[in-house]
Amino acid sequence: MAEIYNEYLTMDFDDKGCPKNLKFNIKDNFNFAYDVVDELAKRSPDKRALIYQDVKGNVKEFSFSDISRMSNKAANILSQNGVKKGDRVMLMMKRRYQYWFITIALHKLGAITIPTSHMVTEKDVADRVECAGINTIIGVADPYVLDTLNKTKPLVGDKVKMYTADKAVSGFDYFFENVDSVSDKFDRVENSIKDIMLLYFTSGTSGKPKGVEHDFSYPLAHIVTAKFWHGCKDGGVHFAIADSGWAKSAWGKLYGQWFCECAVVVYDFENFIGHETLALLENFKVTSFCAPPTIYKYLVREKLEDYDLSNLEELVTAGEKMPEAIAQNFEKRTGKHIREGFGQTETVLQLASYTWCPDIKDGLGVASPIYNIDVVDELGNPVPNGEEGELVIRPWIDGQIPIGIFTAYFNDAELYKYVWRQGMYHTNDKVVRDINGVFHYIARADDVIKSSGYRIGPAEVEEVLMKEPSVLECAVTGYPSKNRGQVVKATIVLKPELKYTDIKNVEKEIKKFVQDRVAAYKMPRMIEFVESLPKSTSGKISRELIRRMDLKKLNSI
């Protein structure tokens, strides 16, 4: 029997295997929890859905029948405790397997799920409670999470009920207490596909985080993500390095994978250790793998040759630009090519080196077949191939906005209107499209460095720096300058295994290395060596935080 996604997406293929004429079969009351998870539990009750391992090596496997049954119990528990359709529930659950039970349960109730990073502060939580009217928070018995929630209590009073999901802890209700006595049957709660299903708070370059709303059609758009980018397949095993608190988890650990009837691996770790991940790839016979470039940087430092990766068919990366040196190192030693992709919390996958065009060695890839993507200037006019512009998504010819694009910024209609100015969705990302239709990333519009009249994309300089033998990680930013507007600054983490007796000489060697490979105006005029780079909760290097720290230092002088 064909995978269940075929009932929701039909398409033709050209002679290169590229899908075309995609048409989604969208039911007015579609609900992923009932129509995919529960349906798969009926058709293939014993098929693996989730493989979980904690840092102690304990392994649990859950079938689609298990997920359906436990989500019904969780839905009953939520309902008995007053959670109903339209309520907003925050989840701070890291990588605990109970996240999947509760998320599917919330979908069944028609409640709004708010996945949240465990690294937020009590003020962040209180702000979200106040802003979104959250009445329930479900966390885990993690010291940081418990401390944050305990500090949140006096800020929110008795407006919010707080649970732990993985074990009982004093001061919190235990969500699954007496779960054996709870019914595993749950009657369908009807919803509209236009109802809000997910709310992600995503940080911008200024101001408080924005609330990004996705409706019940959102999972359908991830069929393309999983099938044609990740390369997920029926009976396969997909492993994505992602915490449940950010949107990449929805991309790689739930919707698209289960549409393809592919199991997902969840590794519940605290600190990333390369050899542990390689062991999981081998032991669970992972067939497709997704991780940000930072993870691959650490994997190539391991003895890759010691692990059996023969089952691994597809590898992809996203989140920041993949350094060419890392990709080449990995491919040379494993024979496996890493394909790139690009998207936002506000959308699903926009650009990618898809399974039908795996030979792209330079660039992010081509446009998603579900989006009408263009490159425009500041006035919204298309720019020729080869010229820099902003990546935008236009409605289709019939005026329809494709599925997978967010429906609103929570409580900010003006901002939503602004990003949809000129009749198109503005991503605020600068790209170049070449004559072959391959997109090349320049930078976030806010990250572009303007120095002495030149516009410099930091990724190009970072690409060169990453080839220098002593550099482990780096970030290139603009540093304020009275004469040039900005100068190029490189913030660098050196490889710890190398011994540095003369740091000034190391700096000189790095500058010489870059000078021989980039135009003079792109040269880093400043280099700062640090032990670690600031990162967002999703694991991306944050140039914005570096700029803020630089400004703070300047203002204190």
Image: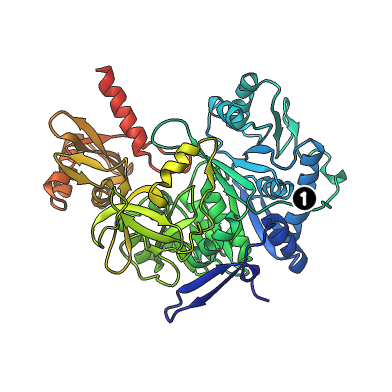
Q: In this view, does 445 lie to the left or right of 213?
A: left
Indicate whether 386 appears above or below 199: below
Q: Name the residue under label 1.
A: 189
Q: Which of 184 and 439 is in front in this view?
A: 439
Q: Which residue lies furthest to the bottom in this view?
A: 15
Label 1, secondary structure: give it: loop
Q: Is residue 53 left or right of residue 465?
A: right
Q: In which quarter of the image is residue 315?
A: bottom left
At horizontal 28% and vertical 40% (from top left) the residue drawn is 492
Residue 443 is situated, as x and y percent measured from the top left of the image, at 31, 47
Residue 396 is situated, as x and y percent measured from the top left of the image, at 46, 62
Q: What residue type is labelled 1?
A: Val
Whether residue 268 is visible? no
Colour scheme shown: rainbow
Which quarter of the rendering shows the C terminus? top left
Residue 128 is situated, as x and y percent measured from the top left of the image, at 57, 31
